[in-house]
Image (cartoon, rainbow, N blue to C red):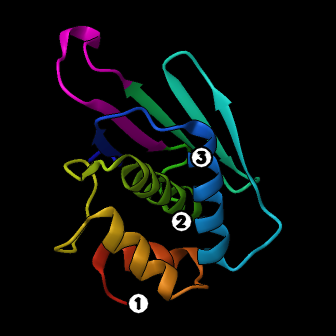
Amino acid sequence: MSVEIEVTCSQRPDPHTLTRVAGFAMRTILGVSNVEVIFEEGETDWTFHWGGGGHVVMFFTAPGEYGIDGPWYLNFNPGLRGRPVPELFMIVLAAVAALLTDGTLNDDNYPFERPDPTAEALLGEVLRESPLEAESAVHLLVTGRHP
């Protein structure tokens, strides 16, 4: 099974705002103060780096591209699969993008077990429980339960 999260939204997120808010969320969740998110812009993708801990690539499709009408499609993929920090970073980036654009998380390709995989539910719960280890944060986000 692929591990990715898609967000559908009516507008393109601002990458700099996304970088700042996701960085704040990650620092709060992990209880660190010395790590920044670095953003790289490509033609059809953006790459976000969480210090040396991993990165996430976001591919995007604008309305009308490839003959697809409708909203913006954002697809988030962790740079390293099976590692807790890139997976946490992917979930946080996708949730922040959905929150900032009034978008919707599509978890068809991600194994959420919780009944409420909305940006508000994901971010609210994990931020209230912070700081957490990366593995514990991923478990809470995926299941809605503490490890």
Judging by the rendered image, the residue that carries numbered circle 1 is 147
Q: Position of residue 58 (x, y in %)?
A: 48, 36
Residue 40, above or below 136 = above
What is the quadrant of the C terminus in the image? bottom left
Residue 50, above or below 117 = above
Is 102 situated left or right of 19 in this image? left
- Residue displayed at 61% across by 85% down: 131
The circle drawn on residue 124 is none
Judging by the rendered image, the residue that carries numbered circle 3 is 17
Q: Earlier in the sequence, mark 2 or mark 1?
A: 2
Report, in whole angstroms, how far the alpha carbon at label 1 lies from the one at label 3.
Answer: 31 Å
Amino acid type, callout 3: Thr
Q: Is residue 55 in view from this perspective?
A: no
Judging by the rendered image, the residue that carries numbered circle 2 is 84
Residue 83, above or below 131 = above
Please say whether residue 64 is one of the residues in the magenta stretch.
yes
Front residue of 133 and 2: 133
Label 1 crowd bin: few (<14), some (14–19), many (20+), radius 10 Å: few
SS class of the residue under badge 3?
helix
Q: Earlier in the sequence, mark 3 or mark 2?
A: 3
Q: Position of residue 9 (x, y in %)?
A: 29, 39
Label 3 crowd bin: few (<14), some (14–19), many (20+), radius 10 Å: few
Front residue of 87 and 99: 99
Report, in whole angstroms, how far the alpha carbon at label 2 lies from the one at label 1.
Answer: 14 Å
SS class of the residue under badge 1?
loop
Magenta range is 61-77
Residue 107, above or below 66 = below
